Amino acid sequence: MDSLGSRARWLAPLLAVGALLLTGTGAAVADPDLSPDPVPGVENLTPLPGARYARAPLVSADGTTAYVGAIEATGTKLYVVDTQTGEVTAEVPTRAGRWAGPMAFGARGRLIYLVTEDTLNVIDTATDTLRASIPVPDQPRPPGTRPGSLSRMAISPDGTTVYLDQSGPHDNGPSAGPSRLLVFSTARRAFTAAVPLPGESPRDIVVRPNGRDVYVVGDVGLVHLTTSAGVPKVVRTIAATGFVDELALTPDGRRLYALSKPDGRAALVGLMRDDVLETIDFRSDSAPVLSPAVSQDGTRLYVLVDDHRTAPKVLSYDTATNTQVTDETVTDFAVERASGLTVGPDGETLYLTGTHYADDPGVYLQIVGF
């Protein structure tokens, strides 16, 4: 049996991708006055025993630890992985249920917020223990229907507010009512507001660096909310993006890429006027496109492509021209199917979660340097 670790091949070096600034996924941001430069992860393929599905990981500001939310047969769990040895150092059970949703670091990475079914879990990263589980407030819904799913999360740049989007209620079928944006105070450790959203199926959230502008996407397009008056308020809806699954914000907060997974395209939106500047076709031949990320210097957009038939690959695009840089394509990962991609805080390490079926079947975290 061939080793999975021998199957990953990087075809060309990529430009560095910066850490995400408390936007709900990715890497925690180090305080330059308190933390040394982040260290790269060592190339490893780490099995996540018992996991049936894993989310894209979070990576600590010093680059030494990766956190992976996973679904198991008996519930949900957070796996803690040493990025230098590739070993699982802790497993933090959250609760029974079949959904490990979005995750985000709290301020300075001291806490992790992890959504499971109808619950926001707070995990202490110093002790790798579950500190609290806060029920999500029920939503207004017709009799006989169930609460909508909690899709994504974002945290304000100052770490004081968590935003969660929730689809409309349903009866085990399509949503049967309006969606909403939930607001959670990290200081009070309580939900403080629920704001109705246009549409029924929100998918992703980002917060601009100014902390005042929140963008939520889904079936109606891109929804702009402002927090200037405290509770978020809808400013406008940009329907020209079409249905959107995921967002990637540029480091200066002036533009974002609104990605549609099944369509294999992204709308580039200018946030000064909330207008669609152009549309990028990734030419993925109907393969799902996911996990968009913009480099720290803003010159590259990366997306993960997985057609569920061949090994996943990463595409690189020049953000000045929004054209593909073909010699920066990454291919032949060890896992057969990818579920998420994160770039480490050193800008030189990728963390991929995925599943392998042929040899050594299971769910893995793959760490690759570039």
Image (spheres, rainbow, N blue to C red):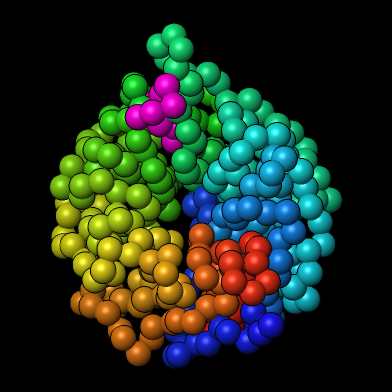
- Residue displayed at 81% across by 45% down: 129
Residue 367 sits above or below residue 240 on the image: below
Q: Is residue 95 left or right of residue 264?
A: right
Secondary structure mainly formed by the magenta segment: loop
The answer to which quarter of the image holds residue 351 is: bottom right
Q: Position of residue 143 (x, y in %)?
A: 44, 9
Q: Is residue 228 magenta?
A: no
Furthest residue toward top: 143
Q: Position of residue 336 (x, y in %)?
A: 52, 70
Name the one closer to the observer, 43 or 296: 43
Q: Position of residue 224 (x, y in %)?
A: 29, 40
Q: Position of residue 369 (x, y in %)?
A: 59, 82
- Magenta segment: 164-174
- Residue displayed at 65% across by 67% down: 361
Q: Quadrant of the N terminus?
A: bottom right
- Residue displayed at 55% across by 31% down: 184
Q: Quadrant of the C terminus?
A: bottom right
The answer to which quarter of the image holds residue 58 is: bottom right
Residue 127 sits above or below residue 361 on the image: above
- Residue displayed at 68% across by 54% down: 51
Can you see residue 233? no
The answer to which quarter of the image holds residue 196 is: top left
Q: Is residue 352 left or right of residue 242?
A: right
> In the rendered picture of this protein, how many numbered marks are placed on residues?
0
Name the one closer to the observer, 54 or 277: 54
Name the one closer to the observer, 86 or 7: 7
Residue 345 sits above or below residue 188 on the image: below
